[in-house]
Image: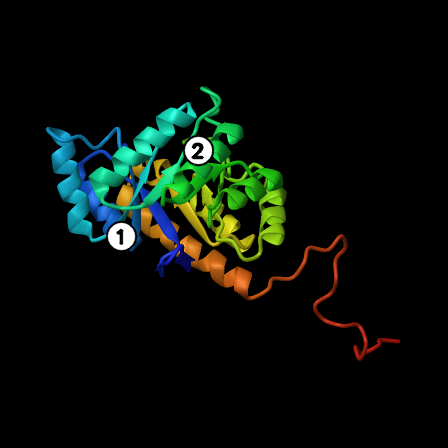
Amino acid sequence: MKLYNTEISVRLLLGTAQYPSPTSLTEAIQASECEVVTVSLRRETAQGSGAGFWKILRRTDCRILPNTAGCHSVSEAVTTAQMARDLFDTNWIKLEVIGHADTLQPDVFGLVEAARILCADGFEVFPYTTADLIVGERLLEAGCEVLMPWGAPIGSGQGLRDPDALRAMRAHFPDTPLIVDAGIGRPSDACQAMELGVDAVLLNTAVAKAGDPVGMARAMTQAIRAGRAGYLADPMEPRDMAVPSTPLLGMAELG
């Protein structure tokens, strides 16, 4: 899979917040085999625990995808992205402009505006968005080359609330990388997302808050691979009625 000009082979992007210990974070990243991790600028600071956290991430050899988590306005998101570029030395940015305090639903109007500003400034933007097709079109027009629709509210673990919307996005944007971001709670959720044809899954809480983060990280990667393989195998369509697997024609008749 190619994200902008970078190729990655593991279709799981992993968040780095809320882990019970630095050791569990490091081991979860290793178990997942992921190549990209997301980092909030609010977590990373120049001194104290932030410096130690940055050293942990550098030892993983993963590509850093900074995010603008917690930003509620265009100006705040743009400023945070610019600071993240200076700190992490990358043009990648996961763009979040939150519009609702309870659901953490994106403010799609502010998101498009911020994306346009950042793309013009040379950023490679990964926008956290809804599964709305028109919003997706506006984000691509703004310069984004990746779309990150939510599966459910951040941290909720509800799985895919509207799989039909994600299926429609896949059909409407056949050549655009789609990464389901937010809401994944179980490996089966990740597998379902991949079976719909999305290109990757980004998750955090489902691993960080699991009883065994390392085991869950490994399970998520396995589920994502299974879902991708299932999608490529072109699964049968559901039917309204039963269809016998053994044909009646040619069966013996008992008189």
Measured as percent of width and height from the top left, residue 7 is found at 36, 60
Tell me the amino acid under the disc marked 1.
Answer: Ala
Residue that protrudes farthest toward the right in the picture: 255
Tell me the amino acid under the disc marked 2.
Answer: Ala
Q: Secondary structure at mark 2?
A: helix
Mark 2 to mark 1 CA distance (whole Å): 35 Å
Measured as percent of width and height from the top left, residue 219 is found at 36, 51
Does residue 126 appear left or right of residue 52 in this picture?
A: right
Ranked by sequence position, the earlier of labels 2 and 1 is: 1
Locate the C terminus and report the quarter of the image it occupies.
bottom right
Q: Is residue 207 above or below residue 33?
A: above
Disc assigned to residue 155:
none
Residue at image x 26%, y 48%?
A: 29
Residue that mark 2 sits on: 114
Residue at image x 10%, y 28%?
A: 48
Label 2 vs label 1, nearer the camera = 2
Q: Secondary structure at mark 1?
A: helix
Measured as percent of width and height from the top left, residue 208 is found at 30, 37
Residue that mark 1 sits on: 31
Q: Which of the pair 53/217 is nearer the observer? A: 53
